[in-house]
Image (spheres, rainbow, N blue to C red):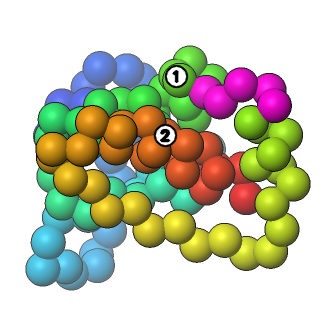
Amino acid sequence: MLESIAATSEKISVENSDEVSDYPRFALKKDGEFTGVFFTGIPGSHEFTSLVLAILNDYSKGKLPDADTQKCISRLKGPIRLRTFVSLSCENCPDVIQALNAIAKSK
């Protein structure tokens, strides 16, 4: 799946690690640096949309928070660790995930 996504743009590539895991997982990087966005499992449905938006957001092309929300995010203090769990039946998950991704990328 990741190779297929990477084939859509020269700006996207897949870098394999030697880390062994019992389940599929991957992280997004931009310019060689982790963005703070990680996926566990194979994203489908809303999660796949969240993956595509996370990639687009790295290049300011996706669904970004408005200026006031970005100011609020920038005022958050201390190290923040967010862990998102999704439900396939949750209609709000895509919006919540994108908001959390924005917070992760700003910190």
- Relative to residue 23, is residue 57 drawn left or right? right
Q: Name the residue under label 1.
A: 62
Q: Is residue 12 visible?
A: no
Q: Could you tell me if the residues under marks 1 and 2 are in contact, i.e. CB atoms within 8 Å?
A: yes
Q: Is residue 88 magenta?
A: no
Main secondary structure of the magenta stretch: loop
Q: Spatial distance from mark 1 to mark 2, Cα to Cα?
A: 10 Å
Q: Mark 2 points at which residue?
A: 98
Q: Does the magenta stretch include residue 67?
A: yes
- Relative to residue 38, is residue 85 drawn left or right? left
Q: Residue at x 16, y 52 (%)?
A: 42
Give the x, y percent position of residue 81: 58, 72
Q: Residue at x 24, y 44 (%)?
A: 90
Give the x, y percent position of residue 89: 15, 44
> Local crowd at mark 1 within 10 Å, few (<14), some, or many (≥20)?
some
Give the x, y percent position of residue 47: 26, 42
Q: Which residue is drawn at 61% across and 44% down?
A: 102
Q: Is residue 78 above or below residue 74?
A: below
Task: Look at label 2 and name its amino acid.
Answer: Gln
Q: Give the range drawn in magenta.
A: 64-68
Give the x, y percent position of residue 12: 41, 33
Residue 49 lies in quadrant:
top left
> Local crowd at mark 2 within 10 Å, few (<14), some, or many (≥20)?
many
| Number of numbered tags placed on the structure image | 2
Image quadrant containing the N terminus: top left
Q: Which residue is drawn at 87% across and 54% down?
A: 75
**Which element type, helix, strand or loop, lies under badge 1?**
loop
Q: Is residue 19 above or below residue 90?
A: below
